[in-house]
Amino acid sequence: MTYKIIGDSCTDLTEELKKDPHFQTIPLTLQVGSIQVVDDETFDQKKFLELVKSSPECPKTACPSPEVYKEAFECEADHIFVITLSEHLSGSYNSAMLGKRLYEEEYGEDRKNIAVFSSDSASSGQMNMALYIQELCEEDLPFEEIVKRTLRYREGMHTYFVLESLDTLRKNGRLTGLQAFFATALNIKPVMGADHGVIIKLDQARGINKALVRMCEIIRKETENSKEKRLVIAHCNNRARAELVREELMKHMEFREILITETAGVATVYASDGGIVVAI
């Protein structure tokens, strides 16, 4: 069978996966003051971080239009799988669903199979799901079976993150139902997670490194059968922290695969300089 795995640009693929023709990313737009940046292959993380640092305004993101998704579906692949940011964090999922409807209205529902998944995650979680779908496609499983297994995989996947600051998430309304965290003066860093795509606070620690270690402790406690799982670590401009997390987890756990990737534009907006996002 022929297949395509399409993610919005918060699907932080490795450089190797970006070259794989089975993968495609749909860019969101980033806004800093009056400046717009397209989150595609031209995105320059260091320049963007400098732009954010120099701007008095909080950066924002805008999801792709349904028409952009529809155009992406007009490819030669028989089976298309779309993975978006959690629908609780972005309108990307709804946009992809509308793009699917537009495609089917024009070409019919029987022309090809299209499945759209809200990842209930972001960044490394989206890449984790994308790789799982690719494995199933390479096994040449039926489309319906891939969809069923992917939904089950999503339910079992966990996302964790530690950021220098939650200000961008707070100012953009991404901490719904969660009291904003204001302990910067004490250098208290929260350890965060996701509950069906909604951001939750798991714990906290004084200093970023202690928070990362605490995150690893929580991961060890919550993870069963780690030898069967893939560990994906995304970092924003700080590979050393990603390596710290990898080494800390490997002291007590084994994984079938470990991947480290760098955040593209959307995850850079919300993770900010030095942020770490883990999916397993």
Image: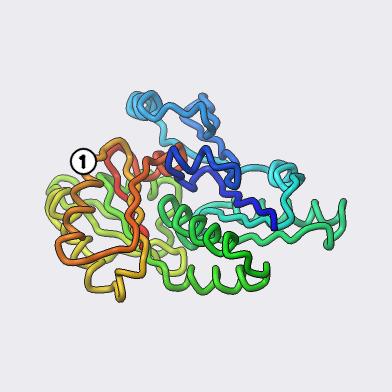
| The N terminus: image quadrant | bottom right
User: What coloring was used for the rendering?
Assistant: rainbow
Count every numbered label the image shows and give the total.
1
Task: Quadrant for residue 46, please give it.
Answer: top left
Q: x, y (%) of residue 178?
A: 36, 62
Type of the residue with mark 1: Ala
Q: Nearer the viewer, residue 132 or 272?
A: 132
Q: Between 137 and 212, which is closer to the camera in this rendering?
A: 137
| Residue 128, percent from left and from top | 44, 57
Q: Which residue is mark 1?
A: 240
Q: Nearer the viewer, residue 184 or 263?
A: 263
Occupied quadrant, residue 269: top left
Query: In which quadrant of the rendered view does residue 104 lie?
Result: bottom right
- Seen in the picture, residue 67 relative to 254 is either above or below; the reply is above
Instruction: Give the residue at x 29% y 72%.
Output: 223
Q: Position of residue 248 (x, y in %)?
A: 16, 57
Tell me: residue 148, above or below residue 275. Answer: below
- How many neighbours does mark 1 have within 10 angstroms: few (below 14), some (14-19), or many (20 or more)? few
Q: Nearer the viewer, residue 146 or 237?
A: 146
Find residue 272 and report its horizontal and vertical position in percent: 33, 40
The answer to whether residue 213 is left or right of residue 140 is: left
Q: Locate the C terminus and report the quarter of the image it occupies.
A: bottom left
Left/right placement of residue 25 relative to residue 125 reads: right
Q: Residue at x 66, y 53 (%)?
A: 96
Residue lying at 55% horizontally and 72% vertically, measured from the top left? 149
Judge from the rendering whether residue 56 lies leftward or rightward of residue 183; answer left or right: right
Q: Secondary structure at mark 1?
A: helix
